[in-house]
């Protein structure tokens, strides 16, 4: 199973952070961020669904 929402297709993305140290910005740190995926039973099958889709009450169409 991929780290991706079955309903909306939300997946991971790269995020950067500017670190300030003594008035100077150091090189940015790249970090991969993942969606909040939960296992949910839909039509008898267990699928990965993000928390925002669960909150909105979205279903597979």
Image (cartoon, helix red, strand yellow):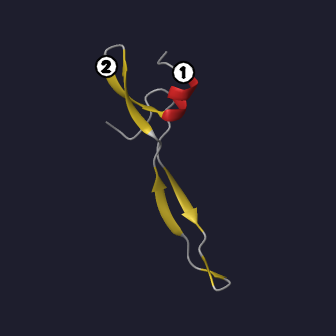
Residue 18 image point, x, y percent = 61, 70
Q: Is residue 41 left or right of residue 11?
A: left
Q: Residue at x 46, y 56 (%)?
A: 32
Residue 40 location, quadrant: top left
Chain-order first, disc 2 or disc 1:
2
Sort mark 1 into few (<14), some (14-19) or many (20+) by Cα contacts within 10 Å.
Answer: few
Residue linked to disc 1: 57
Q: Quadrant of the N terminus?
A: top left
Q: Residue at x 31, y 15 (%)?
A: 44
In the image, residue 35 sits, relative to residue 15, either above or below, namely above
Query: Which residue appears at 50% of the width and 64% of the height?
Result: 30
Please tell me how crowded label 2 is: few (under 14), some (14-19), or many (20+) other residues with Cα within 10 Å: few
Quarter of image, res 2: top left
Decide which of 53, 5 is in the foreground and name it: 53
User: Is 8 situated above or below 32?
Assistant: above
Callout 2 secondary element: strand
Outermost bottom residue: 22
Q: Is residue 21 above or below residue 19?
A: below
Q: Which mark, residue 26?
A: none
Residue 47 quadrant: top left
Residues marked 2 and 1 touching at CB (< 8 Å): no
In the picture, the disc for residue 45 is 2
Q: Residue furthest right?
A: 23
In percent of width and height, residue 42 lies at 38, 18
- What's the residue at 49%, 34% (across, down)? 51
Query: What is the CA distance from the residue labelled 2 to the residue labelled 1?
Result: 17 Å
Q: Residue furthest front?
A: 55
Number of numbered markers:
2
Tell me residue 13's x, y (percent).
Answer: 50, 50
Asked which secondary structure carries label 1, the reply is loop
């Amino acid at each position: 199973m991929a780290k991706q929402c079955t309903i909306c297709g939300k997946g991971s993305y790269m995020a950067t952070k500017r670190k300030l140290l003594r008035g100077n910005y150091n090189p940015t740190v790249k970090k991969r961020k993942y969606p909040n995926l939960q296992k949910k039973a839909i039509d008898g099958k267990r699928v990965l669904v993000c928390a925002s889709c669960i909150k909105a009450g979205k279903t597979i169409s």
